[in-house]
Amino acid sequence: MITVQNLVKMYGEKAAVDDLSFEIPPGTVTGFLGPNGAGKSTTMRMLVGLESPTSGSAMVNGRSYVEHKAPMREIGVLLDAGAIHPGRSARNHLLSLAYTHTLPARRVEEMLDLVGLTDVAAERAGGFSLGMRQRLGIASALLGDPATVMLDEPVNGLDPEGIRWIRALLRGLAAEGRTVFVSSHLMSEMALTAEQLIIVGRGRLVADISVEDLVARSATSVRVRSPQASSLRPLLAGDGITVSTDLDGTLDVIGLSPEAIGTRAATAGITLYELAVQQASLEEAFMELTHDDVEYHGSSEIHPRTATLSPERKAA
Amino acid sequence: MSTTTLDTPTVSDAVANPSTAVLSATGTGLSMRGVLRSEWVKLRSVRSTTATLAAAGGALLVFGLLFAAILGGVLSAGDGDPASEFASDPTGAALSGTMLAQLIIGVLGVMIITSEYTTGQIRTTLTAVPTRVPVLVAKAAVLTAVVLPVMLASVLVTFLGGQALIGSGDLATASLGDPGVLRAVIGSAAYLTGVALMGLAVGTLLRSTAASIATLFGALFLLPGLAGIVLPSGWGDTLLSYLPSNAGTAFTSVVPAPGLLSSGVAMAVFAAWAVVPLVVAAIVQKRRSA
């Protein structure tokens, strides 16, 4: 159980986390989603006491992390797989963590076995690939057999093999009834594992929504391809209707059914080559929700469609 | 036991495994004893610990025996006879390696904490022990537990070997029973331990290895010289005697130079130089973000 209430973290004048409140109930996989710089890592760091909130609270199982007698047994975290001494072996790294909580050395061997690092346990962790470090980080997160597991961008920089492993692991942890709180800036990644989503942008809560609801909410558009697109376009205009033109001249229409579009085109004698309903992907739904909250925009010239659509969609 | 292949994690297996279930019920949580054990594992599991300890012990031995051999006439010194100042101080001659050893042992003290800050390990450490203060206490404890006995053994061997070499010439030798000799021998080991602790405190405060080493050595070597130039004589000299290196000299030498504190006061002053920065470091580390 993670409870964040009116959490604020200021860096000088800038709010990294701005009045954020949410709750992660036990036994779910919750994705913590937002563009880079949205305050996800800062929130996670405050949850485990690496940073103190400017105001508000971040609690784990009803208490602040620091107040727990055995914090590693309440919540296991992997915030940065690189947070290891490169000169120390994987086994000694885990031992040093296990001993703080008087966990036996046997537990370390079990975790090494679990993440598949037993064969290289005596080697210096500095020589590990990113994927191996990620495994070592997972092993340290699970050392205390915590009911809640929190991972910050666990698939970042991993090869497909490693990504597959992390996905299976997250599903496994959830199947055991653990609470999994995992951050990502990729909607597609979350769609595969999470049931619930906490979406943030610029430190603020954008949405606290189930993946299912997000899919249902995401707008559908109609793709219209016609050699007379410029003549057709004015005929489709109206209240609550958005028409945008792609680079190749196809129209994307929101707010009109394909039947209505087809009828209007036929009445005006306009030829249609294509008329198809488009279900917006989760990625697009996410982009829409966070578009205004992206910290650093790239040039939007390549994607005029997204740029023209968002404001209307957000208002709707 | 679960057999794990790289792409099929068997969390369920491991958790369903009875031995894991029993394990998950054991462990009493965070404890000072546990943190001490943890820091001990960390200290012994990096190569630099053994390397710096061996280097510091070696410096004590090589320099001490070299000076003693020159004094005893076993070796002949080059021009200027650098050993002459020690002719009336056989203890000081044998302990002359302390000067170099403190550099090496100071680096050890700095590195056991700055290596955590520069690699990011500190975030893992402080997540495991969010109360933070026990980490620094444990680091100071294991550092002392390793440095003090190793330095004491090195100093003793160097002293005894040194006196044997000096004795082979015409000069008088010192024995551990002579006034002030045992204090100087044990004091030298204690001084080196204190320098390591100062290094730990400075390293915790500054977090960067280079800045910490520069600050520590500045305080030990440059400050006395600089202060001597800047401060007026009179109260300036009094102030100088309170600097860590001068306080150290006062209780590690049998024949102290004039103007130094009495050995008892010097020990207390030096202990304060080791302890006060550690307390400040603990408070600062507890408060700042990691």
Image (cartoon, rainbow, N blue to C red):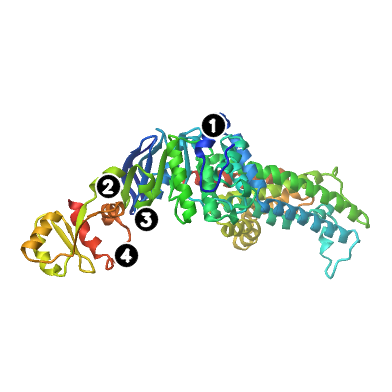
- Residue A261 in the image, given as x and y percentages of width and height: 12, 58
Q: Are marks 4 and 2 in contact (CB under 8 Å)?
A: no
Q: Mark 3 — residue? A: A36
Same chain for marks 1 and 4? Answer: no
Residue A32, image x and y in percent? Answer: 36, 46
Helix, strand or loop at mark 1:
helix
Circle 2 Cα neighbour tier, 10 Å, few/some/many (<14 / 14–19 / ≥20): some
Q: Which residue is mark 1?
A: B24
User: At x 32% / y 58%, what residue is drawn?
Assistant: A295
Q: Write down the chain letter for disc 3.
A: A
- Kind of element beneath mark 4: loop
Nearest to the eye among marks 2 and 1: give it: 2
Q: Secondary structure at mark 3?
A: loop
Cα distance between the residues tagged 3 and 4: 13 Å
Do residues under tags 2 and 1 come within 8 Å of each other at their CB atoms?
Answer: no
Mark 1 → mark 4, Cα distance in angstroms? 48 Å
Which mark is drawn over residue A298?
A: 4
Q: Which mark is residue B155?
A: none
